[in-house]
Image: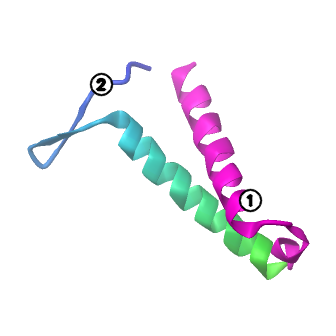
Amino acid sequence: MKFVEINLLGVYVAPMSILMLAAWLVTIAFLRVAGRFGLLRLVWHPALFVTAAYMITLSSIVLVLAR
């Protein structure tokens, strides 16, 4: 896949920003499921865990789409 700018209502948007939004939505869904089952209580530093989960999700999406 080529990462080219996306024309969104006349505004060119970097593809990375679209991927970041998708990763954030997946991370939010994951955190809701984890919170529902009480997994977030087992985490030492919740903010650090959320950041790491987001980075892992974003990296995975980029690696899958770049292949």
Residue in the image at 74% along x and 68% along y: 46
Please state if 2 lies on the left or on the right of 64 as rendered. left
Q: Quadrant of residue 2?
A: top left
Total marks drawn? 2
State the extent of the magenta-drawn residues as a range.
Answer: 38-67
**What number is the disc on residue 49?**
1
| Mark 1: few/some/many CA within 10 Å (<14, 14-19, 20+) | some
34 sits left or right of 23 in the view: right
> Which quadrant, please, contains the C terminus?
top right
Q: Quadrant of the N terminus?
A: top left
Residue at 69%, 68% in the rendered image: 31
In the foreground, 39 or 22:
39
Q: Position of residue 62 (x, y in %)?
A: 55, 32
Q: Residue at x 85, y 67 (%)?
A: 43
In x, y percent, where is residue 33? 74, 72
**Residue identifier under label 2:** 4
* Label 1: element kind: helix
Please determine whether, in this image, residue 27 is positioned above or below residue 4. Answer: below
Q: Does residue 14 show up magenta in the picture?
A: no
Disc 2 marks which amino acid?
A: Val
Mark 1: amino acid: Phe
The vertical placement of 59 against 52, above or below, is: above
